[in-house]
Amino acid sequence: MALRLLVLGPPGAGKGTQALRIARDHGVPKISTGDMLRDAVTSGSPLGALVKETVAKGQLVSDDVIVELVRVRLEEDDAQHGFVLDGFPRTVAQAKALDVLLAGTPLAVVEIRVPDEELVRRVRGRRICERCGTTVSAFDGDPALAQECKTCGGRLVQRSDDSETVVRDRLKVYWRETQPMIGFYENRPTFRRVDGSVAPVDVYAAIAAAVAAVSAER
Ligand code: AMP
């Protein structure tokens, strides 16, 4: 059955990594609004110019802009048989708009929970490949990892919005704007919460089990 999944959670919860893996396993695209916005900023497109400052400060881009970005992306061919959304929705208004876009198509929703101090530690230590966008933990034990991407050999850098000050602001934004959005989903039978503070492989197993349980119920 087609997988339509939302992976929700704060910055540093492991959404991107887990969303990518589960999307690959199901042969569907991982759609990350954060990646799309960063690409727009890098390419210097009109969208990039519009959102650059907001993304740099860790604030939320306006709902209208984001919903339109997602609407267009979900119309692409590769998303017709499923997708995993990472970083969207982030507000109740976005969640409501997504319901309208999906017009009743079943949706699995997984929230990854991790304590705040662990999130700050993780995000400060994370690096992103300049070339292919892969995210790694700079503290994975191998100092070479902090320099070079294992996937493509590109240079690993810190995202400008991963500095400690911006991360703390992003967490405030998360608790203020995004956590209430979880309430929009949590009473649905297709909602599951998983513990994101355990090893990534165990988080993955929990998400896979949640997705299987939700699919079996439908
Ligand atoms: P992420 O990579 O998901 O942490 O997103 C990076 C930044 O992009 C966020 O801090 C926001 O500035 C912006 N962004 C990404 N997704 C959204 C969204 N759904 N709504 C508003 N802003 C977003």
Image (cartoon, grey):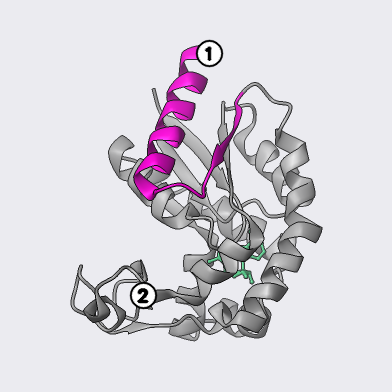
Q: Position of residue 122 (x, y in %)?
A: 50, 67
Residue 2 percent across, percent down from the top left: 40, 28
Q: Residue flagged by tag 1: what amino acid is it?
A: Glu
47 above or below 94? below
Instruction: Look at the image and say whether residue 198 sits in the magenta stretch.
Output: yes
- Residue 10, position in %: x, y? 62, 57
Disc with the residue nearer the chain's start (2 vs 1): 2
SS for callout 1: helix
Is residue 84 found inside the magenta-colored segment of the image? no
- At horizontal 53% and vertical 84% (from top left) the residue drawn is 160
Q: Residue at x 79, y 48 (%)?
A: 180
Looking at the rendering, the stretch of residues picked out in magenta corresponds to 190-218
Report if the beta carbon of the residue with label 1 is closer than 8 angstroms to ligand 1.
no
Number of residues whose C-alpha sits closer than 10 Å to that of mark 1, classed few (under 14), some (14–19) or many (20 or more): few
Quarter placement of the N terminus: top left
On residue 181, the disc is: none
Labels 2 and 1 touching (C-beta < 8 A): no
The image quadrant that residue 67 belongs to is bottom right
Q: Is residue 170 visible?
A: yes
The image quadrant of residue 205 is top left
Separation of disc 2 and disc 1 at Cα?
Answer: 40 Å
Mark 2 element type: loop
Q: Which residue is mark 2?
A: 138
Residue, x 50% and y 37% (percent of image)?
5
Residue bearing the label numbered 1: 217
Q: In x, y percent, where is residue 110?
A: 56, 38
Mark 2 burial class by Cα count in 10 Å: few <14, some 14-19, many 20+: many
Query: For this rendering, which residue is in front, 144 or 26?
Result: 144
